Image: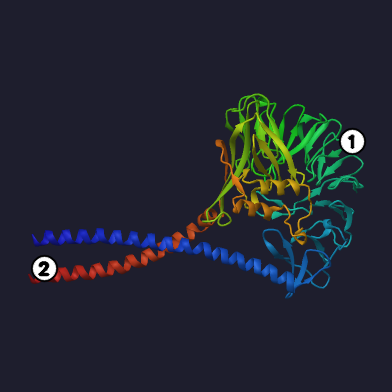
Amino acid sequence: MKSNNLDDIIKKKKTSNTSFYFKIAIVIFGFLVLFSIPISLFYMGKVDGKSYEIKNNGEQYGTSNFFKYQGKIYVFTLNDGMQALENVDMETFKTLNSGDYYTKNIGLDKNNVYFGNVIIPDLDPNKLEVIGNGYYTNGINSYFFSPFSELDKESSNYIYPYKKIENAKNLKAYENLELFAVDGDNVYYKGEILKNTDLNTLKIIDKNNEYFADKENVYYRSKLLPIKNSGKLKIVSSEQGDTFLYDEASGYVFIGDYTFDKEKAPYKVIGNNGTNLYNLIFIGKDGIYYYDSEKKKQLKAGDNIFIGNIEEIAPNIFTDDENIYYFSAYSVRSGSRKSLGELLSRNTDIYYLDKKDGWKKVKDIREGSIGSIWKKGNKYYYFNNLGIFNSIDNTVYKISDKETLNYLLSKADDETDDIKSEGLTAINTDYIRDLIKNEKLIAVSGEKKMTITIKYKTDIVDKIFKYSIRIFLVVYFIFIIFKNFRKSRRISNENKWFWWEFKI
């Protein structure tokens, strides 16, 4: 009986030991996870601090992005800060200093040509010539090197892309179009050949020089889009959202070289130039659509809830045949405040405001840049157009008193931001915030009809995943130490039990 009791005791102790090890592992793992993120953030802060130190204390090469500091040469790159050049000859290193932004990231010494911190081995630095528009040659080899950074999908870092141009002869910059070059046979955009291009009719559509068209074809960068030039192409976007190419003739929609489903066309775009939304909506034949920038595709938000013809009456306000609707937007972050933590999602709401009948526009405030004043019956309203990031959450406000109304109307056309010298206050963002704070403008809450949500992958998750293997190995190592320690104690206790039983 005593032996059986001893076995039970030992089994209980083994169970207790297992539970103990498990608890220890969880505690240590949690501890390391919590502290790995601050350490990572600290490291990034050190990197940023290093870049700041080099920029302020280093010797800049002319107007370029290259700096000499403590026996090394650095170039400033987006996202990664200052990057040291490898195998550089300090004595002969120089920059082009041509005075334009195309050459700010071009460096060379007696041995190499540097595109940023990247060595281009087949460009002879002693024969390097600047063609213009980002194009370079040494008489044998030619390259395009972009002065505009782009997000590299593989590394998730911002880079300055470059491309070698094969078999180019007598390459010349095209003066009328940035990023373009021509030779005897081809037209180039960022080093890529454009097919079937009529250079004489080629025109840029957007301010970023990414969409363009000739008399017949339409392009996104160097890619030919599946559409003909209707003469009614336009760029549409919200203030804080994606940019789309929209053909008013066909109702087709493009973002980059991605084409919205043509079977759902024609699309009616709503929210263009809007300031209180993240996502434009595109009303197709069978529903309301939007573009998810994280999933990189068109998605359906829901069925078409609107009746008849849809018309925008203000940047964030639109109507159908019967009702008035408005946009409102908000972001969700991992922190306790809106401005803190990792971005988790961006959300665009569509609200029903009221029946359409009886609403009349009274006046724009500063040509609509601030907002506008509207009336229904004997009540007056302020339609906000200041945007998402001005700490003004709502789109529609009721004007609470005649004094506020009269002042808004009297100063609506005043373009001055500061008229305090007259003993008055300018109608600007601060003034509108004060009116809201003092309940001179009272937010109107409509009926929410639809929400469009874009979810984002956070850096915190990436960091935890990146370091999880290391953390696991550390935890496992500590686990083994504790296990061996407990094992030695258990053997010692079992010996004691053995001698106790022997004596009995």
| Residue 116, x across and y down, in percent | 76, 60
Coordinates of residue 29 in the picture (x, y in percent): 42, 61
Towards the viewer: 101 or 245: 245
Task: For the C terminus, give its image quadrant.
Answer: bottom left
Amino acid type, mark 1:
Thr
In the rendered structure, which amino acid carries the disc numbered 2?
Glu
The secondary element bearing badge 1 is classed as helix
Q: Is residue 40 above or below residue 240?
A: below
Reading the image, the residue beneath label 1 is 201
Q: Which circle's residue, 2 or 1, is located before the other in the chain?
A: 1
Quadrant, the N terminus: bottom left
Q: Residues within 10 Å of mark 2 (few under 14, many from 20)?
A: few
Give the quadrant of residue 159.
bottom right
Q: CA distance from mark 2 to mark 1?
A: 103 Å
Visual colour scheme: rainbow
The picture places residue 162, in percent across and down from the top left corner, at 77, 52
Residue 501, labelled with which disc? 2
Please tell me in which quadrant of the rendered image residue 301 appears: top right
